[in-house]
Image (cartoon, rainbow, N blue to C red):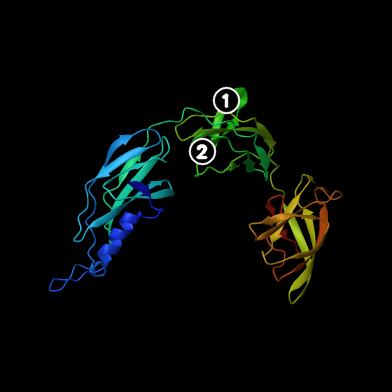
């Protein structure tokens, strides 16, 4: 009889264990062996042998363990990647029916006696199930570009639909003539539906598509393409700040100057800002988000998006905490501290 490890022992097995745990002493006889006195573990089960297998089930057997009192059951573990399940049987064989096609499992078996002593596991068996997946994944959703910079862009997309196991996504750059060049592979399990594409040229237009691959190797259709233009090279800039500080807060006035030769049309700034700090007021900019809970990111308002060469933009911040604006960047370029 086979049953999951998480299940309850059968009444017969439970009664047998209780019987071993009770010492029955007859008049003039030698006391029976008490389970409470049993500290000897069973021997390791013999090597695991596959008796029968199909795409979704496998029957296994192994050489029985021996014990000074008696083995009451075997625990069987089946692990795939970082996921696993445990089963239990009171014989030296088991049929497991909830495995999946094409997956590679690591199988282990160990014996237990009535006193709870466990053997060491026998040598594990690495078992690849027969292929049973004959359907490719659906196409991923059309990628969306976000956090676009001069040399880096992030893409995200809706997941593919897969009937068995989705293994990975591959991101391709679409070059002239429709030639595909793979630029990123996302193979974490389960695959995440986003990727950072780096090493790009500033102020350049790119087209990307995404394809899914299942565990057997079937490929999905390509996603719809996304076209994105990277930002110009980061501008050079200088910053002058005037800060009035108190015990747990400050007000800061910043003047950020475009020291380059090209006009800036639309900007974001970041500066040091602890996770525990709060923004109580801001002018001349709008808060976008907090980067890694260590930086505050802001962007231009509707009237100050353009900073001509030699021009500047002013903004102010009222916030809690003691971390003042430092490491200020303008469109990804680190600003130098201007001389007073």
Q: Which residue is mark 2?
A: 168
Q: Judge whether residue 335 can be spotted in this image.
A: no
- Badge 1 crowding class, 10 Å Cα cut-off, few under 14, some 14 to 19, many 20 or more, is few
* Residue for point 68% across, 33% down: 227
* Residue for point 25% across, 66% down: 35
Percent x, y of residue 132? 43, 30
Q: Judge whether residue 106 can be spotted in this image.
A: yes
Count of numbered circles on the image: 2
- Marks 1 and 2: in contact by CB < 8 Å? no
Indicate the secondary structure of the residue bearing disc 2: strand
CA gap, disc 2 and disc 1: 21 Å
* Residue for point 71% across, 55% down: 289
Indicate the secondary structure of the residue bearing disc 1: loop
Percent x, y of residue 32? 18, 68
Q: Residue furthest left?
A: 28
Can you tell which quarter of the image residue 43 is in?
A: bottom left
Q: Which residue is mark 1?
A: 179
Quarter holding the C terminus is: bottom right
Residue in front for this viewpoint, 305 or 94: 94
Q: Residue furthest front?
A: 27
């Amino acid at each position: 009889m086979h049953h999951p490890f998480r299940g309850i022992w059968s009444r017969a097995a439970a009664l047998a264990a209780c019987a071993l745990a009770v010492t029955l002493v007859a008049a003039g006889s030698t006391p029976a062996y008490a389970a409470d006195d049993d500290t000897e573990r069973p021997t390791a089960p013999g090597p695991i042998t596959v008796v029968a297998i199909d795409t979704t089930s496998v029957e296994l057997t192994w050489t029985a363990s021996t014990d000074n009192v008696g083995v009451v059951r075997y625990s069987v573990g089946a692990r795939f990647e970082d996921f696993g399940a445990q089963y239990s049987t009171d014989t030296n064989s088991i049929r497991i029916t909830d495995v999946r096609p094409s997956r590679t499992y690591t199988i282990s078996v160990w014996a237990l006696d009535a006193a709870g002593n466990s053997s060491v596991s026998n040598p594990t068996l690495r078992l690849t199930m027969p292929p049973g997946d004959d359907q490719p994944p659906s196409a991923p959703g059309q990628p969306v570009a976000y956090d676009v910079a001069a040399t880096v862009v992030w893409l995200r997309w809706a997941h593919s639909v897969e009937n068995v196991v989705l293994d990975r996504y591959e991101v391709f750059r679409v070059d002239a003539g429709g030639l595909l060049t793979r630029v990123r592979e996302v193979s974490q399990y389960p695959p995440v539906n986003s990727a950072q594409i780096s090493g790009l040229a500033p102020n350049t237009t790119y087209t990307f598509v995404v394809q899914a691959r299942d565990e057997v190797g079937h490929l999905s259709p390509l996603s719809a393409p996304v076209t994105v233009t990277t930002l110009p090279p980061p501008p050079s800039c200088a910053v002058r700040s005037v800060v009035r500080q108190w015990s747990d807060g400050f007000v800061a006035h910043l003047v950020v100057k475009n020291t380059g030769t090209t006009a800036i049309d639309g900007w974001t700034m970041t500066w040091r800002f602890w996770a525990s700090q709060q923004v109580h007021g801001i002018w001349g900019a709008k808060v976008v988000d907090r980067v890694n809970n260590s930086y505050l990111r802001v962007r231009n308002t509707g009237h100050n998006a353009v900073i001509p060469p030699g021009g500047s933009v002013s903004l102010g911040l009222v916030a809690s905490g003691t971390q003042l604006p430092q490491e200020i960047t303008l469109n990804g370029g680190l600003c130098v501290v201007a001389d007073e």
